[in-house]
Amino acid sequence: MSSLPVRSVIEFSQFDQLRDAREIIFSEADALRQMGRALGTELCDAVDLILSRKGAVILTGMGKAGLIAQKICATFSSTGTRSHFLHPAEAIHGDLGCLHSDDIILALSNSGETEELRRLLPLLQKMKLPIIGITARETSALGRASQVVLRLGDLKEAGPHQLAPSTTTTAMLAMGDALSLVISKARGFTPLEFATFHPGGSLGRRLTKINEVMRPRKEVRVTSESSSIREAFVRLSCPGRRSGAVIIVDDSDRLTGIFTDSDLARLLEERRDVQLDRPISEVMTARPITIQSDASLEAAVELLKSRKLSELPVVDREHHLAGLIDITDVIGWQPQLEPVKANHSAG
């Protein structure tokens, strides 16, 4: 019985590893710069073609190119362009039924000669679906079948043997990102729309509107300028999460001040107990820092950090109280944000 030869381990120092890794990265970066310099108005033609269609962008590709196509598909979907991935092999076994006459095809193949894609192209042409090809050459099967070719050029794969798809897939990804993001800008896609498509995770949370996460007015202690501190802290109770802030409003129900637990502690430390039964307006912070209810949560967090606030009143355009952002509401979202002593002095 024969046995496989024992494979020897080639000595490969950290210096050699880092040198090779850097060369691979630099090689791919150089290829991207070369492709970027060569890019012409064909990208504009692709943009116009996609914007002219009412259907979805259908991405397709085989193997590593297919994986890149799936990522570009996700980028299209998250930036305002409906898109789906169609596997070339599955397409000819029934998945062609997902296509609509208003769709457009974005096909990826470096060689442009992948067998599964070659079998699919005549079927797409028979359905009269326009094709945009991301491929090395216009003369390939994919290039000839495409209305627009986004040419990658003759790229060499990275690495010592230049075999595994690396530089070419990086180039495909960059070309797809460029196309999808230019189209997104042409559509007037906004950060708010991006947040709508990304409700989970830090990206969506950064762009979330304050009024979606703030404590509503009914959960905030609100009192008039003439009420005493004792009344505000003892008699006022609200459902929901407790906050150390009392918001003061005038006779027109417009916000005029804020009084916090820190302010109360300061009075007690200074032995000004008599002030507890005096009007809260005498010791409140007048004209406190506020934020509009249509601002983003990111803006609120930045204000809390930069002005060292623990509570931030949220107001509408008429300066009526809409709600409150407490530092404890966002501390989990921004771990580096630490509770600080309230400082609501405007300035």
Image (spheres, rainbow, N blue to C red):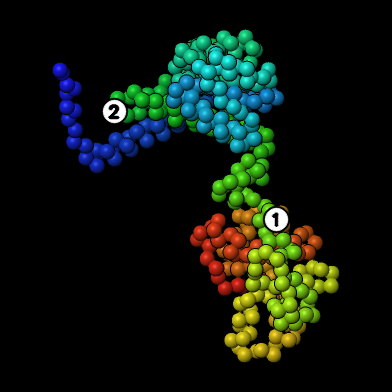
Q: Is residue 327 left or right of residue 212?
A: left
**Can you give x and y, in whole percent of width and height, for residue 327 in the image?**
59, 64
Packing grade of label 2 (10 A; few <14, some 14-19, many >=20) is few
**Can you give x and y, in whole percent of width and height, for residue 150 in the image?**
53, 22
Packing grade of label 1 (10 A; few <14, some 14-19, many >=20) is many
Say which residue appears at 33% left-offset and 24% top-offset: 162
> Vertically, is 154 above or below 258?
above
Nearer the observer, disc 1 or disc 2?
A: 1
Say which residue appears at 63% left-offset and 40% top-offset: 197
Of the two numbered discs 1 and 2 on the same chain, state the one appearing first in sequence: 2
Say which residue appears at 29% left-offset and 28% top-offset: 160
Q: Name the residue under label 1.
A: 211
> Vertically, is 121 above or below 39?
above
Q: Residue 160, labelled with which disc?
A: 2
User: Front-most of 110 and 195?
Assistant: 195
User: Front-most of 243 and 138?
Assistant: 243
**Can you give x and y, in whole percent of width and height, for residue 215 in the image?**
68, 61
Say which quarter of the image contains residue 101.
Answer: top right
Say which quarter of the image contains residue 182.
Answer: top right
Q: Is any part of residue 56 visible from this angle?
A: yes
**Most distant residue in the front direction:** 1
Q: Is any part of residue 48 visible from this angle?
A: no
The type of residue carrying mark 2 is Pro
> Vertically, is 280 above or below 63?
below
Say which residue appears at 39% left-offset and 28% top-offset: 166
**Most distant residue in the right direction:** 252
Label 2 SS: loop
**Can you give x and y, in whole percent of width and height, for residue 85 in the image?**
56, 25
Label 1 SS: helix
The type of residue carrying mark 1 is Asn
Q: Distance between the residues labelled 1 and 2?
A: 55 Å
